Amino acid sequence: MEKVLVTGGSGFIGLHCIQQLLDQGYEVRCTVRSESKKQEIVDSMTTHSLNPHNLEIVMADLLKDEGWDEAVSGCEYVLHVASPFILEVPSDENILIKPALEGTLRVLNACKNNKVKKVVLTSSVAAIAYGHKDQKVFDENDWSDTGPGITPYAKSKTLAEKAAWDFVNQLSDEDKFDLTVINPVAVTGPMLTSDIGTSNEMLVKLASGSMPACPKIHMGFVDVRDVAKAHIFSMKSEKTNGERIILSDKEMFFVEISRVLNEAGFKKAPTREMPNILVKLMALFMKELGGILGSLGRQSTTDKSKAKNLFDWEYVSAEDSAIEATKQLVSMGLVK
Ligand code: NDP
């Protein structure tokens, strides 16, 4: 039985990767950075997976060297999913950049030392389409501009992904392993623990009516199950070797996704848009709005053709994904 390491086993996307891998008969090892997360993962897989016993959980922190060689040892494949993801703009950008960049290099170095066959890295559309002044349809040839104006999160994802490509491109023939990078847009969908993940927080805000109207933000959406599926497909498929792959069902303005929720019965979800000036004022009090100010009013569109050509399944629609997640958020008492 092949063994796969999933880094960031406690996270929203990491848990779906673990669940799908277990259900497909893989042995899975995952990393956490605190003991307290272990039981939560075991409980989740006992509930959601057909093979919960094939899971091993080990400790490793992206900011520390210890644990990574042991975590990777004996694994044919590594899905490197872990990276800090927060909406707020931190006081120091290195809070995000250091673990993303140095952590990726720690994981890849351990992959080299342990003769891993292939790594799939979870990057983001934030490494492709951010920090640009022009508006266009972004594709896998584009890189975010890490100059002034980019958010620390987008910078962390861009620098980490670039470092990963540099790392594998410089490997000797003897040390070489394959790399595929998945670049998802905003990920929504069902949660496998009580930790709802950063992107579903946006649905909480919309469906609970905590904002009177929607900021004029345009972004792509994709369901978490398709993101996990794309990681596992890429892990096994040689066709994806050396590729970056944008993963998006479709783009929508916040007000469009909010109207979908409203029509589905979440009547507090706003159906109007807010003037940009008001969003800027609100951002003075709501830190989590800081990260979206640069995107206000801009269309953010990506080319989805590479993924559609490679992956042979229909995505869960952005609308169904958001509705399903919001129903779960209601049942968890997070949307009233
Ligand atoms: P989560 O916040 O749910 O998961 C992040 C994971 O990274 C957690 O397991 C977290 O551990 C772990 N992590 C963070 N910092 C460290 C650290 N210093 N050492 C070890 N582990 C750490 O986010 P998502 O599941 O949504 O994100 C997973 C990946 O997907 C990230 O790389 C993110 O950038 C990327 N992504 C996410 C998108 C989205 O919309 N959700 C869109 C595009 C890309 P802990 O539980 O201990 O905090």
Image (cartoon, helix red, strand yellow):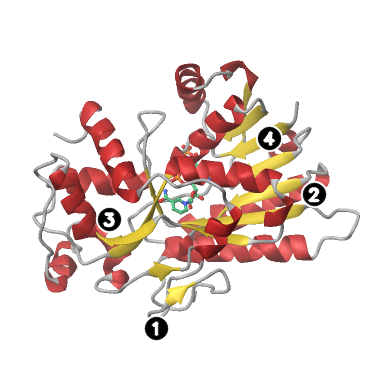
Task: State the CA–CA distance, disc 3 to disc 2.
Answer: 38 Å
| Residue at 16% from the left image edge and 72% from the top image edge | 276
Count the marks.
4
The residue at which mark 2 appears reads as 112
Q: Where is residue 143 in the image (x, y as percent from the top left)?
A: 54, 73
Q: Which mark is residue 288?
A: 3
Q: Which of marks 3 and 4 is nearer the N terminus?
A: 4
Q: Residue 134 carries which label?
A: 1
Q: Earlier in the sequence, mark 1 or mark 3?
A: 1
Task: State the CA–CA distance, disc 2 to disc 4.
Answer: 15 Å
Q: Which of marks 2 and 4 is nearer the N terminus?
A: 4
Q: Residues within 10 Å of mark 1 (few under 14, many from 20)?
A: few
Q: Kindly indicate whether the residue at mark 4 contacts the one at mark 1 (C-beta within 8 angstroms).
A: no
Q: Nearer the viewer, residue 240 or 29?
A: 240
Left or right, 138 with reference to 73 = left
- Cβ(mark 2) to ligand 1 < 8 Å? no
Q: In this view, does 223 lie above or below 95?
A: above
The residue at which mark 4 appears reads as 4
Q: Which of marks 1 and 4 is nearer the N terminus?
A: 4
